[in-house]
Image (cartoon, rainbow, N blue to C red):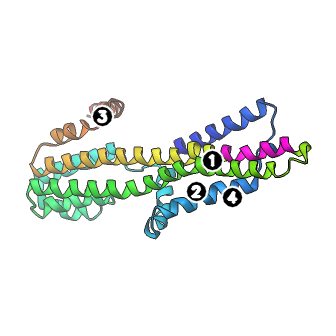
């Protein structure tokens, strides 16, 4: 589970609830089932109109990718590629064929398979970069669904408010109920704006950020694969791949390597 997503949603909705209570309101005041149905299902329907069945069936997997942490550790990938570089320099590129079958990441496995097959480096880069573009397009579909929903949701909220006000105006002969009717009408706008800005658009932003993170890792893998193919020494492979990481991760890797070197020195 991606803790950032869960914590963010809890903080955002918690802020709404706390603000409501500080204003002297009650959660019951915000409960309006007809408005909720209109906003949620109206937004879903409008979003469906702009997509297709294939996109809709992919929504569960898109939600999963937004809520689940990316378990691909870039430092682990670098360590793996450094190991491949050592093996390739001592035993040859073909020695990586068996090891490539054990790689779980499909992109990395494809890169190793390409260099094992003797594919020219220019073509290796072209093939893997095409894979990145295709991945971005797939991810963009899921992101677009939630961005679209975030655009429709406030509008559906306004529609719900207008419908509520029309119902209120039809009952002007009962002035004692007008205050409650007006408040109930505006809950639809609240639902629409809140769902757009606290659910749909944040999920779209999360998917966009995860795609950008995955693209960086894939580009780092391409650099490592080509470096291994060129016969670079393991240290060069590591340095070329490390260039894609933020300074914090580089420091963490350096500290871990320093600790390992100290242990080896003591053991000697």
> Which one is earlier in the sequence, the residue at label 1 or at label 4?
4
Q: Are marks 2 and 3 in contact (CB under 8 Å)?
A: no
Q: Position of residue 5 (x, y in %)?
A: 54, 44
> Which one is earlier in the sequence, the residue at label 2 or at label 4?
4
Q: Position of residue 1 (x, y in %)?
A: 53, 50
State the image quarter where residue 21 is shown: top right
Q: Which quadrant does the C terminus fall into?
A: top left
Q: Note whether 115 is above or below 174 in the view shown.
A: below
Decide whether the magenta segment is chiefly helix, strand or loop. Answer: helix
Q: Position of residue 178 (x, y in %)?
A: 85, 43
Q: Is residue 180 magenta?
A: yes
- Name the secondary structure under disc 3: helix
- Marks 4 and 3, how far apart in space? 56 Å
- Marks 2 and 3, how far apart in space? 52 Å
- Marks 1 and 2, how far apart in space? 9 Å
- Name the secondary structure under disc 2: helix
- Marks 1 and 4, how far apart in space? 11 Å
Q: Which mark is residue 37?
A: 4
Mark 1 vs mark 3: in front:
1
Query: Residue 31 or 174: which is nearer the viewer?
Result: 174
Q: Residues within 10 Å of mark 3 (few under 14, many from 20)?
A: few
Q: Which mark is residue 257?
A: 3
> Which one is earlier in the sequence, the residue at label 2 or at label 3?
2
State the image quarter where residue 264 is shown: top left
- Marks 2 and 4, how far apart in space? 10 Å
Residue wearing tag 1: 192
Q: Note whether 103 is above or below 160 in the view shown.
A: below
Residue occupying the point 78% across, 46% down: 184
Whether residue 52 is visible here, answered yes or no, is yes
């Amino acid at each position: 589970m991606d803790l950032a997503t869960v914590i963010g949603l809890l903080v955002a909705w918690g802020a709404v609830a706390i603000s409501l209570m500080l204003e002297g309101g009650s959660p019951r005041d915000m409960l309006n089932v007809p408005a909720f149905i209109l906003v949620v299902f109206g937004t879903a329907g409008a979003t469906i109109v702009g997509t297709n069945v294939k996109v809709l069936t992919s929504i569960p997997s898109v939600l999963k990718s937004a809520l689940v942490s990316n378990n691909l550790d870039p430092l682990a990938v670098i360590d793996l590629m450094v190991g491949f570089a050592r093996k390739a320099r001592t035993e040859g590129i073909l020695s990586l064929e068996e090891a490539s079958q054990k790689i779980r990441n499909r992109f990395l496995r494809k890169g190793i398979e390409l260099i094992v097959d003797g594919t020219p480096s220019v073509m290796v880069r072209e093939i893997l970069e095409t894979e990145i573009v295709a991945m971005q397009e797939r991810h963009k579909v899921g992101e677009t669904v939630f961005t679209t929903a975030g655009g429709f949701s406030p509008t559906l909220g306004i529609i719900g408010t207008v419908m509520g006000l029309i119902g209120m105006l039809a009952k002007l002969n009962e002035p004692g109920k007008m205050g409650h009717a007006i408040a109930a009408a505006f809950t639809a706008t609240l639902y629409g704006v809140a769902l757009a800005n606290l659910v749909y658009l944040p999920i779209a932003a999360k998917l966009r950020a995860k795609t950008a993170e995955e693209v960086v890792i894939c580009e780092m893998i391409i650099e490592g694969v080509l470096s291994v193919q060129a016969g670079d020494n393991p240290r060069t492979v590591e340095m070329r791949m490390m260039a894609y990481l933020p300074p914090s991760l580089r420091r963490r890797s350096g500290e871990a390597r320093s600790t390992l070197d100290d242990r080896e020195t003591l053991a000697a």
